[in-house]
Image (cartoon, helix red, strand yellow):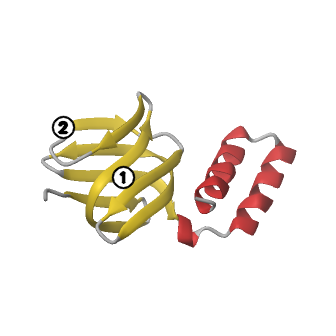
Amino acid sequence: MATLQVELVAADRAVWSGEASLVLARTLDGDIGVLPGHQPVLGILVDGSVTIRATDGTIEAAVHGGFFSVSENRVSILAETAELASEIDVQRAERAAARARQSGSQDDLDRAETRIRVASL
């Protein structure tokens, strides 16, 4: 069975890498699903979740900005920031969302809400 070689990298660290059967992400052009044999593509990520169906389970991550690249069964997700769902401190994200609502910062609110949503998946 063919698989994808996937790397999820944030500006400050390698977040996850391994083999997967499917990757789902959101780009400026819309949602994209990648299976083995997918045509090459390059996209700009928008804030949201990335789902990776790894050979040993499903990985969920919150990503904010960056790029998404597919070529020869390799998927590279290069995000400004990225956190695995298991790493997200929900209480901290809820406090960040409350601060963003008070300050009126829509970008900060979007990031906090994305983190909360991904942590609950």
Which labelled disc corresponds to residue 5?
none
Q: Furthest residue to the top?
A: 29
Which corner quadrant of the image does residue 45 belong to?
Answer: top left
Q: Which residue type does callout 2 highlight?
A: Pro
The local secondary structure at tag 2 comes to: loop
Q: Do the residues labelled 1 and 2 touch (CB within 8 Å)?
A: no
Q: Is residue 50 above or below residue 31?
A: below
- In percent of width and height, residue 78 lies at 36, 52
Q: Mark 1 points at which residue?
A: 78
Relative to the observer, which residue lies in front, 112 or 117?
117
Q: Give the mark nearest the N terminus, 1 or 2.
A: 2
Q: Which residue type does callout 1 highlight?
A: Leu
**Residue drawn at the location 75% of the way across and 41% of the way down:** 105
Left or right: where does residue 31 sit relative to residue 2?
Answer: right
Q: Name the residue under label 2.
A: 40
Crowdedness near tag 1: few (<14), some (14–19) or many (≥20) residues, C-alpha within 10 Å: many
**Residue drawn at the location 49% of the way across and 59% of the way down:** 61
Left or right: where does residue 118 sit relative to residue 97?
Answer: left
Q: Which of marks 1 and 2 is in front?
A: 2
**Residue drawn at the location 71% of the way across and 61% of the way down:** 93
Which corner quadrant of the image does residue 85 belong to?
Answer: bottom right
- In percent of width and height, residue 115 lies at 62, 56
Left or right: where does residue 81 sit relative to residue 103?
Answer: left
